[in-house]
Amino acid sequence: MKDFKYDPDDLIAALATPWAESALAVIRTTGPDCISAAARIFSPSDKLDQAAGNSIVYGYISDGEVKLDEVTAAVYRAPRSYTGQESVEFFVHGSLPGIRKILELLFRSGFREASPGEFTFRAFLNQKMDLTRAEAVQEIISAKSNQAQSLALNRLSGSIENSINTIKSEVTDLLASVEIQLDYPEDEAEMPDVEAGETKPIVGKIDRLLSTYRAGKIYQEGVRVVLAGKTNAGKSSLFNLFLKEDRSIVSDIHGTTRDYLESWISIGGIPVRLFDTAGLREADHPIEAEGIRRSNEIIDNAHVILYVADAQEGITADLEAFMSAYKEDSRCLYVWNKIDKAATAAPDGFIKVSALTAEGFAELEEAIKTVVFRDHYVPGNEPVIDSMRQKKLLEEAREALNRYSQALLDGMPMDMAAVELTDALNALGEITGEVTSADVLERMFSNFCVGK
Ligand code: GDP
């Protein structure tokens, strides 16, 4: 592999925990002879220098005679560490001036500041993990819901790598059988039947993996559910009810703009981004018109639209206009709100609720889940791909396999068609990182956090 921008044999150090006052902070270091280098700023120095792998040493970070902090150090000897190199993790007190002094001392003592993702990059270079696992590391850190986190954990355990390796070995078998035919064309008895159709089961497997991509996206980006309807229909009240009933709110983004609110909630384990739009009324005022334009944009991009109607008002012109505009749109659910107040019969198919008393709320959640499960693939236990990079490469592999089949059907000589199989293998190899170029690697890891 070509030279990397950052030398993988440098000693590196970084704060692995947030730059904020806290009870403890973790400073991570790694590199060849990292333990001896770290021991030079540690007392008792020998104790750290001679520590066994996977052990904890208690002592002080010392700048010459001056003690900077009382710490514990976790010692990892190569290759049994995250990076595959010697590593020391210091658990220090979480004071910002204290952390700064320790980092400065490390940088004066032969360590340089780690670039983003550099620890994981070394883990990859030292074959501690393939690229799909390295990507899963970052996906775990940025997961927005329990499900997203556990899907990423599944990838970290190598589920994607295993699937890719299975597909790869099938392509390799196919290529091998082509080569046998090329080498022994006359020996028909020995000749395995290589037909264009033989790529079908392989392409099927790739398709299956690709079909999980959207589900992965849904877990990462959330299902977008939007509350629409006239002013005073009870959208804000319902929005608040969702927030109150959901105990697993991940984050709460209030007032992103004046015209809508957004919040992450979880419905039946699915992460949901709930939007409350500005009222959908006709506007003369330009600012309000802009708000409505944006509301409409949110509605257009939603996975589920909850149109909230006020039962006290009954069927209004707005409701009728909306229903006729969205007649064919299966994303819409109609909510008949304020049933605690109004005894009016709900139109067919409307979900009766009271945002005030929460009556009907469970049914509403159930209806949302039904739409999500009907329209979007929600994964079970199989690996789910979550990376655009992996998706593109899988598509490349699929195209190459299809080109191979087509070439044989077109009567192209087998040795020429076989080039496509090699292309497919290359694309698959790039997914796990066997044949990935240095630029791509550097770009990938630069999206990581520093210290990971
Ligand atoms: P929005 O303009 O659609 O966001 O409507 P709001 O949520 O602000 O509600 C408008 C008014 O209706 C407020 O006074 C709410 O307290 C009231 N409201 C909302 N939902 C209900 C409900 O289910 N029952 C009753 N009785 N009042 C409600």
Image: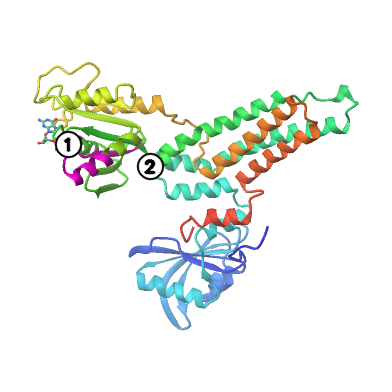
- Would you say the beta carbon of the disc 2 residue lies within 8 angstroms of ligand 1? no
Report the side of 341 relative to 337 (left or right).
Answer: left
In this view, 199 is above or below 296:
above
Q: Earlier in the sequence, mark 2 or mark 1?
A: 2
Q: Residue at x 65, y 44 (%)?
A: 429
At label 2, the amino acid type is Ser
In this view, 236 is above or below 451:
above
In this view, 331 is above or below 438:
above
Q: Quadrant of residue 69?
A: bottom left
Applied colour scheme: rainbow
At label 1, the amino acid type is Ser
Depth order, front residue of 384/278: 278
Residue bearing the label numbered 2: 145
Residue that sits furthest to the bottom in the current view: 65
Q: Quadrant of residue 197?
A: top right
Residue bearing the label numbered 1: 237
Q: Percent from the top left, x then y, of residue 206?
A: 59, 32
